[in-house]
Image: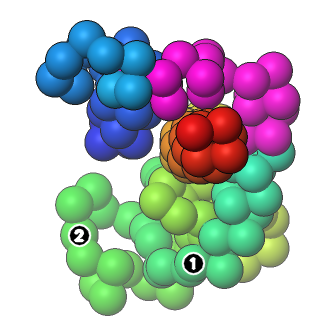
């Protein structure tokens, strides 16, 4: 998650302007044309983050049920009644024992936030690339 935030900061217009040599308009025009994040970025990244969170529910792993069996023992050493199935990736937020599924709401929110941040970074980078290409084609037509 920290890597996604670093990439978003590095491709921002301010960082782009300060990392290019020269003061000519050709170096900074792409970042200036792209501007800041667009208003549609937040809702679409939240929606994409939710979609990724739900799609990754297929990632399952056996886990020890909390409060059952001796603490610190391996899953193979526990009786069957103390084993459950956890779903979600990277955080296991849906825990199902033999009859009742339990949702860890904090893990669900953290998982959704991580995937939303990754989605926002990707959408922002694509927006910068698109703006740069549009600006380059406009400059080629004008020049």
User: Can you say which quadrant of the picture contains the N terminus?
Assistant: top left
Residue 50's disc number: none
Q: Residue at x 68, y 46 (%)?
A: 141
Q: Earlier in the sequence, mark 1 or mark 2?
A: 1
* Left or right: 133 in relation to 141: left
Number of the label disc, if any, that sits on residue 59: 1
Q: Nearer the viewer, residue 77 or 106?
A: 106
Look at the numbered discs 1 and 2 and tell me whether their residues touch, using CB distance below 8 Å: no
At 47% across and 59% down in the image, what residue appears? 90
Is residue 68 placed above or below 128 in the rendered structure? below
Question: Above or below — where is 138 with respect to 32?
Answer: below
Quadrant that contains the C terminus? top right
- The residue positioned 34% from the left and 26% from the top of the image is 27
**Residue visible at 53% across and 64% down?**
89
Q: Position of residue 98 (x, y in %)?
A: 72, 78
Work out whether residue 49 or residue 120 is closer to the camera in this orientation and state it: 120
Image spot of residue 114 (x, y percent): 53, 42
Any part of residue 21 in sight: yes
- Secondary-structure class at tag 2: loop
**Residue nearest the observer in this picture, 84 or 14:** 14
Q: Is residue 42 magenta?
A: yes
Q: Which residues are magenta?
A: 28-45
Instruction: Give the labeled residue for mark 2.
Output: 73
Position in image of residue 136 (x %, y %): 56, 44
């Amino acid at each position: 998650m920290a890597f996604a935030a670093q990439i978003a900061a590095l491709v921002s217009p301010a960082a782009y302007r300060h990392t290019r040599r020269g003061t000519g308009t050709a170096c900074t025009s792409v970042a200036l044309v792209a501007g800041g994040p667009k208003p549609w970025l937040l809702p679409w990244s939240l929606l994409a983050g939710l979609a990724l969170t739900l799609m990754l529910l297929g990632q399952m792993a056996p886990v020890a049920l909390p409060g059952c069996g001796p603490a610190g023992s391996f899953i193979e050493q526990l009786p069957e009644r103390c084993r459950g199935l956890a779903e979600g990736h990277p955080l296991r937020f849906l825990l199902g024992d033999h009859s009742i599924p339990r949702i860890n709401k904090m893990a669900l929110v953290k998982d959704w936030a991580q995937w939303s941040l990754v989605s926002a970074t990707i959408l922002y980078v694509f927006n910068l690339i698109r703006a740069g290409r549009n600006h380059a084609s406009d400059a080629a037509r004008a020049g």
